[in-house]
């Protein structure tokens, strides 16, 4: 039994195991957070964290220096639909120019699919925006999960993983992937700071976004293996 387990682990690459773990953890976390979102009253976890971003007794005044509010608005725009569309379009056009249509299609499906999934989840849960503190930006859509958090996770993790495939050295790969994760985290934090999402909305967006990005990567990996291609994509037509 032990030898069989070792043989299985040797045949399955570590990134594949890690992707599977991320998907499982993301789905579990999202399911747990749905219970919080469907509760009739806000969870203490949500209210305490949201109020921590406001001055004591002043729900209209965010903490920190005056420039921080503007910085958070700039950061939150990195997860907006307009910015994501511009970035993804530029990447897809570049991939088409260097004759990597399959990779371009992968990026499109991953990001567009993530946006569609986010909209469906919002409609299914139907959680209104928080009213505990003032909104520092205008938002009209539903709250759970955070679309900005989910879309930034899908977009920047997908692009980060794609870039890491072509970068030399482990250090540069780790740097790019860490930058993608950091950007995703900052976008999510900005949503709570600006008062337009409960913390559980953002956590759910991260869970769903990470799981979807890893599922797309795992599907692409399996497709390449099925076609007998190398996982790094070097055999794609046009190289």
Image: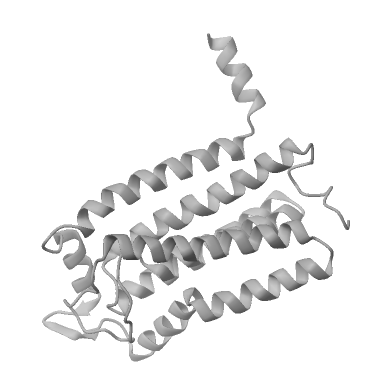
* 171 to the left or right of 191: right
For the C terminus, the quadrant is bottom right
Residue drawn at x 27%, y 78% is: 195
Position above or below: 31 against 162: above
| Residue 7 image offset from top left, x and y in percent | 63, 17
* 55 to the left or right of 114: left
Residue drawn at x 11%, y 61% is: 40
Residue drawn at x 84%, y 63% is: 99
* 39 to the left or right of 145: left
Position above or below: 16 against 122: above
| Residue 39 image offset from top left, x and y in percent | 15, 57
- Residue 180 in view (yes/no): no
- Residue 76 in view (yes/no): yes
Colour convention of the picture: one colour
| Residue 70 image offset from top left, x and y in percent | 40, 88
| Residue 19 image offset from top left, x and y in percent | 54, 42
């Amino acid at each position: 039994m032990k030898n069989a387990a070792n043989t299985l682990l040797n045949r399955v690459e570590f990134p594949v195991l890690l992707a599977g773990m991320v998907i499982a953890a993301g789905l579990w976390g999202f399911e747990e957070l749905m219970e919080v979102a469907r509760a009739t009253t806000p969870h203490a976890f949500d209210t305490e964290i949201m109020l921590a971003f406001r001055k004591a007794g002043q729900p209209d005044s965010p903490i920190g220096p005056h420039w921080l509010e503007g910085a958070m608005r700039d950061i939150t725009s990195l997860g907006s639909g307009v910015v994501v569309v511009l970035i993804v379009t530029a990447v897809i056009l570049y991939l088409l120019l260097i004759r990597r249509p399959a990779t371009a299609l992968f990026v499109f499906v991953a990001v567009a699919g993530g946006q569609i999934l986010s909209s469906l989840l919002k409609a299914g849960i139907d959680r209104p925006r928080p009213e505990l503190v003032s909104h520092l930006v205008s938002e009209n859509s539903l709250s759970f999960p955070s679309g900005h958090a989910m879309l930034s996770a899908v977009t920047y993790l997908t692009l980060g993983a794609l870039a890491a495939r072509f970068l030399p050295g482990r250090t540069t790969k780790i740097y790019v992937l860490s930058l993608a994760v950091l950007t995703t985290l900052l976008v999510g934090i900005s949503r709570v700071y600006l008062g337009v999402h409960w913390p559980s909305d953002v956590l759910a967006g991260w869970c769903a976004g990470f799981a979807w990005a890893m599922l797309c990567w795992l599907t692409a990996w399996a497709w390449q293996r099925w076609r007998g291609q190398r996982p790094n994509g070097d055999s794609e037509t046009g190289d």
